[in-house]
Structure formats: C-alpha cells, structure tokens
C-alpha cells in the first residue's frame, strides 16, 4: 500500500470524497475532453465500415506499428533480425504470422527491451494483470492507448443506452470504502463522471438495502460490475421476490455464466451487455443490442485464434486467442498470447456492424468467498492483491471453513519473505481480520481433468 492509499484509508469520508474527485479530475484531463471526442467520433464511424474497409484500416495501422517497433523498440528489432523479417515484408494482414508469438514469459524477460526508446518514463502509464493463474505481469502503455480504451468502453456503454454524462453505478474491485467501516455509506461518489462507486467488500444481507436505497435516490438506471458481484445483488432481490428495474447492466472481467445472466436479468428487469477486454489493452469485444455474441472491435486490435501448433483455426472451432494492439506504441504487444480461448462464430450480426462475432471466452469457473459475518467476496476482487506480486508463478485460493483460507503459492527463485507479507496485507485489506489466512508453498498446483486451473475453490455455501 503506497502513502496515498494509506492517507485515503485513514481519512474521514468527506476527505476521501475530495481525494477521489481530485484523482478523477486528473484522469479526466488526461483521458477525456477534446482528445476523447476526436477519437470517439472516428471510432463511431469505423464500426460501420465494410469488411474490406476495416481490413484496410487494420493493415495500415499494422504497417505503421511494425515499422515503428523495428526502429524504436529493441526487442522487435532483434526479433525481426533473428527471423529475417523486415517491416516492408508486411504487405497483407496475413503477413503478421511472419512474426513470432509474444508470450508472457517473453514480456517478463524482455521488459526493458519492449519499451520504446522514444517515450520518456513520465509519459508511460503502468498496467497490471494477475492473469488466470494468479501470477502477475506488469506492462506499460501510452496516454493515447488510455484514450482509445475509454473510447471503446464508452462505445459499448452507448450500445446499452448509457451516454457519457448520464449517472451510473460501478461495483468492481476498487477498495473504495475501508473494510473496517461498519455503517453506510458503503459507496463514494465521483462527481466528475457522475459515477457512484459501490463497495464490493460490504455485501452482507443487512447492508444491501442501503445499496438499493442509494441507487433509487440517485435515480440510477445503469450499473456495471463483475458478474459474480452483481449476482450477489441479484440473489438478494430474487430471494425476496423483488426487482429493481434498470435500463441495462454491464458486466466484464469474468466469464458470465448462464445462471448468473438469468438471475441478474430477472432481478434488474433488463438485458446484460457483457464485454471482454484485457489489462494488456490488446483486444476488446462487446455485445450489441442483438446479444448474439461479442463483436471483436477490429479498430482496437487484431485477434487470431490458433491451435496447439500455432496454426489458425476455422470459424466455430476453439482456438487460443492471440492479439495485437494497434495503438500502444510505448510498449507494443504484437501477437501477444493471452490465457484465454474462444472461437469466431460463423454468422454475421443483424445489427449491421461488420465486426465479427466471437463466442464466449473459455476460462475457469470461480467460486465466491464467504466471510464469517456473511459478506460475499467476488473472486475478481481477490485478484488485486496479486497484481503487484512479481515473484509468484501460480497461486490458488481455497476456503475449507467459514473462517479459514489457504493460499497455495508456487514461488519463483526471486521470492522473498517480504512478498508474503505484502500479499497477506493486501489480502486482509479486502477480507478483514475475521479470517485465518495461511500461505502454503507448493511445487505445482493440480489442474482439472480438462487441464484448467481453478483459481478460487470455496466449499462454503453462501448464506443467501
């Protein structure tokens, strides 16, 4: 926890609100305003281009990126030299296969070489991902990439009917309300973006009426969050035979399971608009009003679906997703191998967009952690303590008792005792001191029969 987080955590609510909005104003100046609307207007038109026009756009962007990477990114200069590839060899989109796939290990081992020599450090923005195995990865992108990402995000929100400037609520992984706070408000307000941050760490049955009272008072018609967290809110309403009508719910960051969709749509009497993105900013896929799949945003990046031999799979066949960001010049990721798998659907969407439809992402199913006081914690919330951890190869969270959690860790050679202390501190900030948390070091973590790692295993049934 840095000093800013410590100050925020110890501050009274009114000061937390000031600090939050000060940060929001800083981010607004960086990501929104004229630069945002310029890109937004461009992207708004791109989604309606023909398939041929979209491919021409991608090819132009790819050529520019490859030429730039060859000249200013040491890693790609070496890779192209080793593979006898020159930027001029990229004449069509299919030529991207002349470059090797970029793995997570390659990013870790060549972090500095992947940085553009043209970007000073003060212009870089840092991203983190814990991945699907609880092993972190750090990377960087430029401010333009931040703008593009938020443009794609708001283009998705517009599909759901939410316009920039409309009030909406978010319930995600930010520890926006200190865990130790026992009384409402279990939210903080971002007045800059008319956004209410609901706490994901106070989801106990007795607290939930306060959440819905706030949403009703502010006339909130849109809410975004993790599927598992929104599912908790939906369970509460469905158990009571009540509903809280909204215009749309937006979900991301986890696989949205059918049982979750049904419960959430019933509770909020509206459709879910699910979208898929990555902290690495290489791929973005969104649902339109037809809800037939996820449109791959081809103006955001290039997506490939490959078999175990690295060859493209046919439509409707599952393949590992490999993606290329078309906009991040600070630390280009070309043909980045994700941990996810999916397939291109055979049909076109009747909405008129030529962005191809992608099927649901195949990732692990996760469980919800139940705390002794009844609070329910989304597994996506628990990824956050792992994001700054560089020396963990894999991890797994197991809850066998209402007050006991075991964190299994496969550590790297660089792992030190301080890493354990930092992890436990971040973990306890999100689950409190009611739980006994034990770290167990193992050589490997067993997979399921289909080879997947189930990251969170809870053997405790939620109270409601």
Image (cartoon, helix red, strand yellow):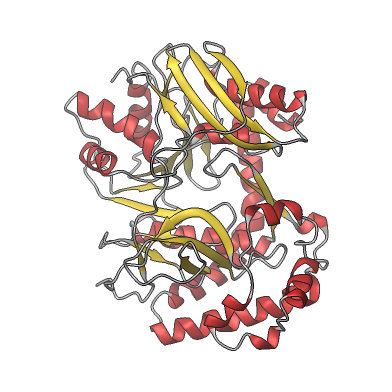
Instruction: Name which residue lies at 72% across and 32% down.
Output: 4
Return the x and y of residue 371 as percentages of the image width and height: 44, 16
Image quarter hosting the C terminus? top left
Horizontally, is 269 left or right of 230 in the view? left
Q: How many badges with numbers are in the image?
A: 0
Seen as rendered, the residue at the extreme left is 241
> Within the image, what quadrant is residue 329 found in?
bottom right
Asked whether the viewer can see residue 183, the reply is yes
Q: Can residue 163 be seen from the camera position used here? A: no
Q: Looking at the rendering, which quadrant does residue 335 occupy? A: bottom right
Residue at x-position 80% and y-position 55%? 122
Q: Position of residue 421 (x, y in %)?
A: 71, 22
Image quadrant for the N terminus?
A: top right
Q: Position of residue 5 (x, y in %)?
A: 69, 30
Residue 337: image location, x then y, percent: 56, 59
Tell me what residue is drawn at x 52 percent, y 67 percent. 310
346 or 271: which is nearer to us?
346
Q: Nearer the viewer, residue 163 or 425?
A: 425
| Residue 319 versus residue 13 in the image, above or below | below
Please say if 138 is above or below 8.
below
- Image point (61%, 40%), residue name: 135
């Amino acid at each position: 926890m840095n000093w800013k987080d410590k100050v925020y955590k110890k501050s009274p609510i009114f000061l937390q609100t000031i600090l939050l909005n000060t940060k929001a104003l800083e981010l607004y100046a960086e990501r929104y305003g004229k630069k945002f609307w310029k890109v937004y207007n461009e992207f708004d038109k791109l989604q309606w281009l023909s398939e041929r026009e979209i491919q021409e756009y991608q090819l132009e962007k790819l050529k520019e990126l490859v030429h730039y990477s060859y000249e200013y990114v040491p890693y790609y200069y070496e890779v192209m030299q080793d593979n006898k590839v020159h930027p001029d060899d990229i004449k069509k989109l299919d030529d991207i296969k002349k470059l090797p796939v970029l793995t997570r290990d390659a990013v870790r081992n060549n972090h500095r070489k992947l940085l553009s020599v043209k970007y000073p450090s003060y212009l870089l923005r840092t991203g983190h991902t814990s991945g699907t195995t609880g092993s972190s990865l750090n990377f960087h992108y430029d401010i333009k990439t931040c703008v593009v990402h938020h443009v794609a995000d708001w283009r998705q929100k517009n599909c759901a009917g939410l316009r920039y400037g409309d009030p909406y609520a978010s319930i995600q992984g930010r520890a926006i309300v200190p865990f130790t706070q026992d009384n409402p408000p279990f939210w903080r307000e971002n007045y800059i973006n008319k956004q209410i941050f609901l706490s994901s760490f106070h989801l106990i049955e007795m607290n939930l009426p306060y959440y819905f009272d706030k949403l009703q008072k502010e006339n909130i018609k849109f809410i975004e969050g993790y599927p598992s967290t929104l599912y908790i809110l939906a369970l509460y309403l469905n158990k009571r035979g009540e509903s809280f009508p909204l215009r749309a719910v937006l979900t991301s960051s986890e696989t949205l399971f059918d049982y979750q969709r049904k419960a959430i749509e019933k509770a909020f009497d509206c459709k879910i608009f699910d979208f898929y993105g990555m902290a690495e900013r290489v791929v973005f896929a969104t649902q339109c009003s037809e809800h037939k799949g996820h449109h791959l945003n081809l103006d955001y990046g290039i997506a490939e679906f490959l078999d175990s031999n690295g060859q493209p799979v046919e439509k409707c066949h599952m393949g590992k997703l490999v993606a290329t960001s078309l906009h991040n010049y600070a630390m280009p990721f070309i043909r980045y191998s994700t941990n996810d798998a999916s397939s291109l659907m055979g049909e076109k969407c009747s909405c008129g967009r030529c962005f191809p439809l992608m099927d649901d992402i195949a990732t692990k199913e996760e469980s919800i952690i139940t705390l002794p006081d009844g609070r329910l914690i989304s597994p996506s919330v628990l990824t956050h303590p792992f994001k700054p951890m560089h020396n963990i190869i894999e991890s797994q969270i197991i809850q066998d008792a209402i007050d006991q959690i075991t964190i299994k860790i496969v550590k790297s050679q660089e792992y030190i005792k301080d890493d354990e202390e930092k992890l436990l501190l971040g973990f306890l900030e999100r689950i409190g001191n009611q739980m006994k948390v034990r770290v167990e070091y193992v050589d490997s973590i067993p997979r399921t029969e289909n080879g997947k790692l189930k990251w969170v295993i809870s053997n405790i049934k939620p109270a409601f």
